[in-house]
Amino acid sequence: MRTTRMMWTTVATLLPLLGGAVAAAASSSEWLSLCSKCLSPAIFSKSGIDTANATAQARITREDAAAWCENWEPQTPRQQCVRLQMSSDDAKKVHRATADCVAGRITPVDGQSYTLAGYWTSDVGRGRSRWRDARGRIVGQDNASNGLAISQQWEILCPARSRNTGAAASSPGGAKAAAPAAAKAPPSTLTPEYRIGQVVEAKYGREWVRARVTGIREARRPDGSRLEYDVSLDNGRRGIVPAAMLRAVP
């Protein structure tokens, strides 16, 4: 069973492989998103990046499980927590994602096929790829639909195509997709404690690590909404965390 949770992951380094055909060991700083708050598997091989035959394979590591446990279940004995995470179904298998970057198609880790349908122009996915499933339905940005996890895998497999920076970026059918808006906090009645671009310190295990805020999103929860912060740490990790795990730099 997939456990919904937040964790630290490492910053993706999106460097295309020469020729796109030679498999290579991926940097340990890359991962494939299973869902917005899941323990994500680390990529160990890639090939064909930015081509019609892009592939990435990943598996959940004990190191990332330990980091998640330190942050999110400190009340649970570390070995017990790590053992629980590593015994999950997701940790027992190799996760594989493939894409045809030329045609705008992807088969992410869920094994289904999706077609690029432009780019989101609003909400938390603003500027990121939007997808249509095999039945022609747009996959939503919400956690249940998991559309942004597909976007993240596309960004790993097809980084050049993922950069929707032009005013007339094209979708596979030739229709022009709207250019992304500049990064900014989503409309909300909540007041952010930190701003995009601000240098802060983030709680990582038992330590506070220097980091930078790269995004702000509103998370709607049964007990009400709260703001969460995308942060990149100086140690190479990144994550989505609540304000309680950040502090201002003196």
Image (spheres, rainbow, N blue to C red):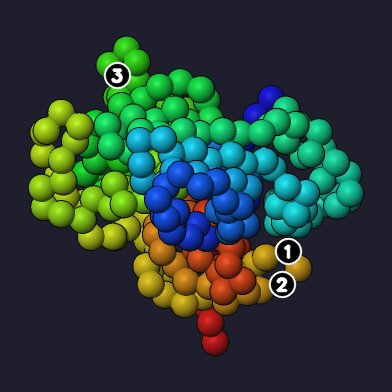
Q: Nearer the viewer, residue 204 or 43?
A: 43
Position of residue 16 in the picture relative to residue 200 (left or right):
left
Measured Cα–Cα span from mark 1 to mark 3? 40 Å
- The residue positioned 47% from the left and 77% from the top of the image is 199
Position of residue 73 in the picture relative to residue 141 (left or right):
right
Q: Is residue 149 above or below residue 12?
A: above
Q: So how many labels did they put on this image?
A: 3
Q: Which amino acid does label 3 sit on?
A: Arg
The 10 Å Cα crowd at callout 2, few under 14, some 14 to 19, many 20 or more, is few
Q: Which amino acid does label 2 sit on?
A: Glu
Q: Are marks 2 and 1 in contact (CB under 8 Å)?
A: yes
Say which quadrant the C terminus sits in.
Answer: bottom right
| Residue labelled with disc 2 | 207
Between discs 1 and 3, the one toward the N terminus: 3
| Residue labelled with disc 3 | 137
- The residue positioned 43% from the left and 39% from the top of the image is 54
| Residue labelled with disc 1 | 205
- The residue positioned 67% from the left and 65% from the top of the image is 204
Between discs 2 and 3, the one toward the N terminus: 3
The 10 Å Cα crowd at callout 3, few under 14, some 14 to 19, many 20 or more, is few
